[in-house]
Image (spheres, grey):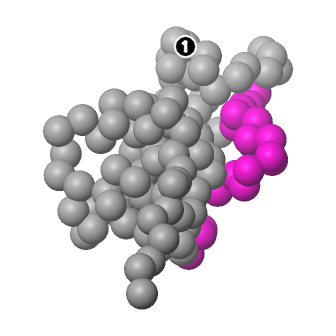
Amino acid sequence: MKRKVRSSPKGRTADPQALEDVRGLLGDAPRRRDLLIEHLHRINDRYGYLSAAHLAALAEEMRLALAEVYEVATFYHHFEVVKEGEAPPPPLTVRFATPSRAIWPVRNLFSRTLPLEKRCA
C-alpha cells in the first residue's frame, strides 16, 4: 500500500516574520534542546512575552515539537505566554514618588540620581 504524500506540513507552520525575529535573537547560538529555556528567555526578554507565532518559530528553528516548546514555556511562571488572538500584556511601568511628590515612570529612574538616604526612605 502506498501512503499519500502530504501537500503541506502537519501542524502549525511558523510565520516568516516570527521565524526571522527568532533567528535574529538566537544569532549563532547552538540550537540544542538543552538550551530551550535560554532561548525562551531571550524572546521573553526582548518582547516582554512569548507569542504563539514566536513559539512556533522557535520550535521550527530548534527542530522540536511545538507541544514540547509550549509545555516548557507554560511550565515556568516567569514566562508570559500569549495565545493566538490575545492581546499582549501592556509594558510594565513602575512608579515611585520623589521628594517633591512628583511621580516618575521607571524609565526616568536612571536619568535622575537621588541621594542614598532619599532612595531608601
Please name the residue shown 52% across and 12% down the image: 111
Please name the residue shown 80% across and 46% down the image: 85
Q: In this figure, which residue is indicated by the disc labeled 1? A: 112
> Front-most of 107 and 69?
69
Image-based side of 31 in relation to 98, left or right: left
Please name the residue shown 44% across and 77% down the image: 3
Image-based side of 41 in relation to 10, left or right: left
> Magenta stretch containing residue 89, yes or no?
yes
Provide residue 18's location: percent of width, then percent of height: 51, 36
Please name the residue shown 40% across and 54% down the image: 60
Provide residue 76's location: percent of width, then percent of height: 54, 71
> Front-most of 119 and 4?
4
Mark yes or no: residue 96 visible.
yes
Q: Which residues are magenta?
A: 73-97
SS state under label 1: loop
> Front-most of 11 and 116?
11
